[in-house]
Amino acid sequence: MLLFECKTFNALTLNELHDLYALRSAVFVVEQNCVYQDIDGKDPLALHLIGKKKDKIVAYARIVSPGVSYTSFVSIGRVVVSAIRRGENQGHQLMTFCLKQTKKHYPKEKIKISAQAHLEKFYNEHNFVATGKAYLEDGIPHIAMVLKE
């Protein structure tokens, strides 16, 4: 079981900031072979959801308020689990924590994500439904999804 925390950008320690960027880079840039601008200016505006095992960040996501990624929706993004921790149900634990924190901080807002298309079934299990056709984002097929009410 992971220990989860939700922190503002300013509450992150320098080590946590380093480790979450290292995790995002290891998975999104290196593992998925995707060159993109990860540091996009949204992190200072986000809530950072960190899953730790023995003080090491192994799962991460961020939540941004309406108007940052989508005009009328809160967004959950940069959802990632370390390669060595996959298959241990930690992605589901992370999404459950994300939804709980999103509802806590934005109780009246609708939630939208831009999911990698191959993870559509994973997000369906958390009550997200696709709202259109797949599109390319940073060279990877994605699909817009919203949380069913």
Image: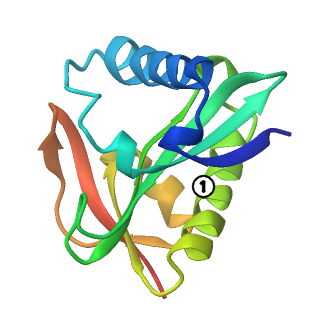
Secondary structure at badge 1 equals helix
Q: Residue 108 location in percent, x, y?
A: 47, 87
Q: Is residue 92 above or below residue 66?
A: above
For the view shown, which residue lies furthest in the front direction? 10
Q: Quadrant of the N terminus?
A: top right
Q: Residue at x 74, y 31 (%)?
A: 52
Q: Residue at x 30, y 70 (%)?
A: 66
Is residue 132 rendered to the left or right of residue 85?
A: left
Q: Residue at x 25, y 39 (%)?
A: 41
Identify the residue position indicated by label 1 in the image: 95
Q: Residue at x 37, y 65 (%)?
A: 65
For the residue pair 14 and 97, the one nearer the viewer reads as: 14
Q: Is residue 98 above or below residue 33?
A: below
Is residue 144 rendered to the left or right of residue 61?
A: left
Looking at the image, how many numbered discs can be counted on the residues? Answer: 1
For the residue pair 146 and 39, the one nearer the viewer reads as: 39
The amino acid beneath tag 1 is Met
Q: Residue 64 location in percent, x, y?
A: 38, 58
Q: Residue 120 location in percent, x, y?
A: 41, 55
10 Å neighbourhood of mark 1: few (<14), some, or many (≥20)?
Answer: many
Is residue 4 rendered to the left or right of residue 16?
A: right
Which corner quadrant of the image does residue 102 belong to?
Answer: bottom right
Indicate the colouring scheme: rainbow
Is residue 71 rendered to the left or right of residue 66?
A: left
Q: Residue 83 location in percent, x, y?
A: 59, 20
